Structures are given as structure tokens and as C-alpha cells.
Image (cartoon, rainbow, N blue to C red):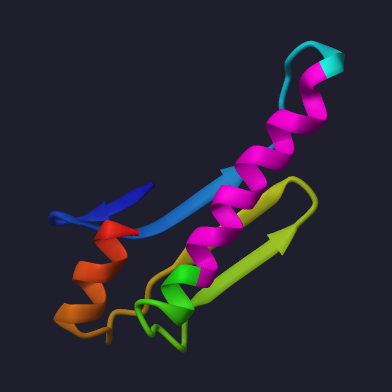
Amino acid sequence: VEWKAEHIVAMTVDGHAETDEEYDNIVCASISILAQTCVLALAHVAGIEDLEYGIDDGHLSFRLPETITDDQRDKAGII
């Protein structure tokens, strides 16, 4: 998580779960769904249309644009 002042400006989730083989998929899937939900909520709930993000195997990252409104920044902080 990258912060600027008191606000989150970027986040990266990288890698795969290194747990017992039996639970690898559920751990990875759980983290993946939460991270993807954050990206969707930033776009659809906070209304940040020009959100920079990338999703690949074992990787998700996003960066908030500097031009977002105070209301969008507040909603992003909650998300």
C-alpha cells in the first residue's frame, strides 16, 4: 500500500499463497476476489473512471489518479 499524506494512492497484491497445498487455491482466490472487488468499487461506487489498474496471474495493482475529487478520495479511503 502506498500512502500520500493520510490517503491511500496505490496498492499492489503480488504473488501466490505459500500455504499447505490443500488450501492454496482458497487463499489465493479469497485475496484475489477482495482485491478485484476494491478495483470495481473504486470505479463504480467512488466513481473513479480513469483508475489505473493491472490484473495478471498472481498480480493486481491500482493507482488512484491525482485529479480525483475530495468526495472520491473519501470514498476510496473507505473502500
Could you tell me which residue is drawn at 60 percent across and 59 percent down?
36
Could you tell me which residue is drawn at 25 percent across and 60 percent down?
77
In this view, 41 is above or below 16: below
Quarter of the image containing the C terminus? bottom left
In this view, 40 is above or below 8: below
Magenta segment main secondary structure:
helix
| Residue closer to the observer: 65 or 33 | 33
- Can residue 67 be seen at all in this image of the molecule? yes
Residue 51 x, y percent position in the rendering: 47, 79
2 sits to left or right of 18: left
In the image, farthest residue toward the right: 21
Residue 11 x, y percent position in the rendering: 45, 53
Residue 9 x, y percent position in the rendering: 32, 62
The magenta region covers 23-40
In the rendered picture of this protein, how many numbered marks are placed on residues?
0
* Quadrant in the rendering for residue 19: top right
- Can residue 14 be seen at all in this image of the molecule? no
In this view, 42 is above or below 22: below
Could you tell me which residue is drawn at 26 percent across and 52 percent down?
3
Asked whether 66 falls inside the magenta stretch, the response is no
19 sits to left or right of 79: right
Residue 58 x, y percent position in the rendering: 74, 45
26 sits to left or right of 6: right
Could you tell me which residue is drawn at 15 percent across and 79 percent down?
70
